[in-house]
Amino acid sequence: MKRPANVVLHGPESTGKSTLGARLAAHYGTRLVPEYGRLYCEVRGSETDADDLVSIMHGHVALTEAAREQAAERGARLIISDTDPLMTAAWAMMGLGQRLPALDAFTDVGDLYLLMADDIPWVDDGIRLHRTPEARARFMALSRAELERRAVPWVLIAGDAEQRFAAAVAAIASAGIA
């Protein structure tokens, strides 16, 4: 069985990752790997330390592997991940102001990253923390820097919901993934 490609949604809070992820998974008839960090924070709260972020990384990895196995069994060519450990690494820089060796050691990166622009309104959902324009801009810069530091393939996705969806589908096709 061929291992499905992993298309990862990346970017700061409240930029439409989950919404686009669900739509892409439905479009391609594949698995959506949920944002493990959100699931973790819904149970334990939004205040995280280095140990929490490493636990979140391990949760991402476990969910991704399970989704890949299920997708491969069905013959799917890709999975969609609502963030991954690279986003957790950006979160470490945003929240803790430091890189974490365990996150830096993560090597099972996605095949394509869709970096979500912070050009849509921030929505308070009780979990998100960085609401000011300055904080959002800083988080966006850290998110982009993590992709550049890792030299992974990525495309900036911006605009309204329809523009984002069309740009994501085009980026996936251009990458030869689907």
Image (cartoon, rainbow, N blue to C red):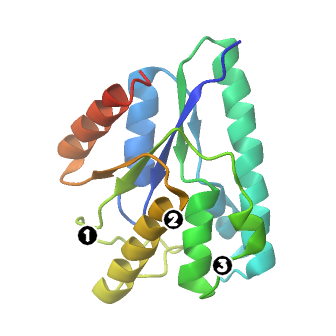
Instruction: Give whichever of discs 3 and 2 has the lower sequence position.
Output: 3
Q: Whole-Å distance between the Cαs marked 3 and 2? A: 12 Å
Secondary structure, mark 2, is helix
**Amino acid tagged 2:** Arg
Query: In this orientation, does residue 132 appear?
Result: yes
Q: Position of residue 82 (x, y in %)?
A: 52, 49
Asked which secondary structure carries label 3, the reply is loop
Give SS at disc 1: loop
Q: Position of residue 100 (x, y in %)?
A: 72, 75
Q: Is residue 136 above or below residue 174?
A: below
Q: Residue at x 69, y 80 (%)?
A: 48
Depth check, mark 1 against mark 3: the one in front is 3
Label 1: which residue?
Answer: 121
Q: x%, y% of residue 170?
A: 26, 32
Q: Which residue is mark 3?
A: 99
In this picture, is 125 found above or below 153? below
For label 1, the crowd category at 10 Å Cα-Cα, with few meaning under 14, some 14 to 19 and many 20 or more, is few
Callout 3 amino acid = Arg
Are the two marked residues, 1 and 3, in contact with CB atoms closer than 8 angstroms? no
140 sits to left or right of 95: left
In the image, what residue type sits under mark 1? Pro
Question: Quadrant where the C terminus lies?
Answer: top left
Say which residue appears at 45% left-offset and 74% top-offset: 142
Q: Residues within 10 Å of mark 3 (few under 14, many from 20)?
A: some
Q: Does residue 12 show up?
A: no
Q: Which residue is pictured at 29% across the width and 84% down the height?
A: 133
Residue 149 is labelled as 2
Q: Badge 2, how many Cα within 10 Å: few under 14, some, many 20+?
A: few
